[in-house]
Image (cartoon, rainbow, N blue to C red):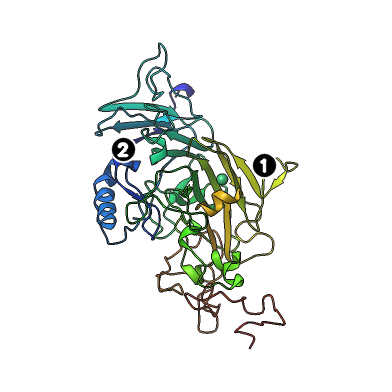
Amino acid sequence: MELCKYPKRENVRTFHIEAIQIPIVYNKYGDYDPNGLLYVLEEDAERIQREALERFEMEIPQPYKEVQPLIIRVNLGDTVKVRFRNSLNRRLSIHVQGLSYDVNTSDGASVGYNGDSTTSGEIWYTWYADKEGVYLFHDMADPRSTEDATNIHGLFGAVIVEAPEAKWFDPETGEKLQSGLMADIYQPGKPAFREYSVFFHDELEILNKDGEQPIDPHTGLPASTTAISYRSEPMRNRMPHSHDPADSGEDVSMSSWVYGDPAPPILFAYVGDPVKIRLLHGGVKETHVFHLHNHQWRLEADNPASTILDSITISPQECYTLDILYGAGSLNHVIGDVIFHCHLYPHFMEGMWTLWRIYDRLQDGTGKLPDGTPIAALMPLKDRECPPKKDKCHPGYPNFIEGRFGESPLQPPFGVRHLAYGNRMGR
Ligand SMILES: [Cu+2]
């Protein structure tokens, strides 16, 4: 057979995407955007709308887990075909940044003498996945930054180009994954890794549970809200429980023992798991500084001489892949909750922070957090040693800490001892 006729794998991947409009609830305190917009896969559209509206109608509106920025994954070398259906009462599009496409048919924009590839109905886009990495997409039919436009309300997502032959699975169930912020990625010849997508976005249109503009309790002035992946945990909802200055320290105000878990998606791993964070700025307003505690990465992942970072400035519409050195828990094999946040403190206070939770024992879905919330199962990566099971003497994080929900957190056992105060384990 002539080499040029040698059969090759059919490498076209097709996605059917819609845009839906629903109120997006940003946290358990009922803060919400009444005019939320998001891209979803067509097969999920009806379920997501129904479930999200049901929770929105509760006495205090509650978030629905699957309301999240759309992430689709493809392999390097794939041709990506997207059928975009728009049933909303405005022109919309999908414009991808960084992948190749024909500007006349697949730009998702209406620019100069180029063809208009925005739509009021249905359109097909073709993109070429010619480089590994993470690529933001968003609506370019209305590129304005105002509340009348689409970006502020969440109309963005991303395509991740994985290694050739890589496959992706649900970290909770181990099943094949169609879309989702978090995935376990298996690739030939290299270790499997946890993949976490983290979208920063800002200057949202937010009302509180009573349908009013949220007010900063310290200034009495209107409070802004910043977000990670359609969720936000502003400090105005986590007021100190007493006037004791110790109750307003960071170790209390950020603690899940005192207030429960923050709203933005928590990242889960077993200690030592290889990890890539796909960091994106979905918004169009402000620059942020992504800062991750206790871990570092190289600015250029494949360059051993490259600068080592634990913070990176990210401007609107930028994307980075952070290949975390030494994996979850870093060199000191830390277990527990590791915070990440915008390092501009007003943004941090307005909600832009959450946790990376690193377990030491197998989580099979039967555990409970101190506030009673079930702990979701986490599939161990199959090419690593399975984490040990819990037993009576080794309940695993977070259950080995003798904390009580609603009370100030304690030091971990045999952790930092304070002679004056001690801790309950030490007494
Ligand atoms: Cu910021």
Question: At numbered mark 1, what does the secondary structure look like: helix, strand or loop?
Answer: loop
| Amino acid under disc 1 | Leu
Say which residue appears at 37% left-offset and 50% top-offset.
207
Numbered disc in front, either 1 or 2: 2
* Ligand 1 position by quadrant: top right
Residue at the extreme right: 305
Residue at the extreme bottom: 427
For label 1, the residue is 299
Badges 1 and 2: C-beta atoms under 8 Å apart? no
Q: Which corner quadrant holds the N terminus?
A: top left
Give how far across and how far down residue 281 sits, in percent.
51, 40
Say which residue appears at 34% left-offset and 56% top-offset.
209
Question: Does residue 391 appear in this view?
Answer: yes
Residue at the extreme top: 113
Say which residue appears at 24% left-offset and 47% top-offset.
46
Residue 120 or residue 248, whichever sits in front: 248
For label 2, the residue is 19
Q: Residues within 10 Å of mark 2 (few under 14, many from 20)?
A: many
Whether residue 233 sits left or right of residue 15 in the image: it is right
Q: Which mark is residue 64?
A: none
Give how far across and how far down residue 422 sits, in percent.
66, 82
Question: Would the CB of label 2 be found within 8 Å of ligand 1?
Answer: no
Q: Which corner quadrant holds the C terminus?
A: bottom right
Whether residue 292 sits left or right of residue 266 in the image: it is right
Give how far across and how far down residue 311 sits, in percent.
65, 48
| Amino acid under disc 2 | Ala
Residue 360 or residue 343, whichever sits in front: 343
Q: Earlier in the sequence, mark 1 or mark 2?
A: 2
In this rendering, is residue 113 above or below 316? Answer: above
Question: Does residue 362 appear in this view?
Answer: no
Q: Residues within 10 Å of mark 1 (few under 14, many from 20)?
A: many
> What is the C-alpha distance between the residues marked 1 and 2?
34 Å
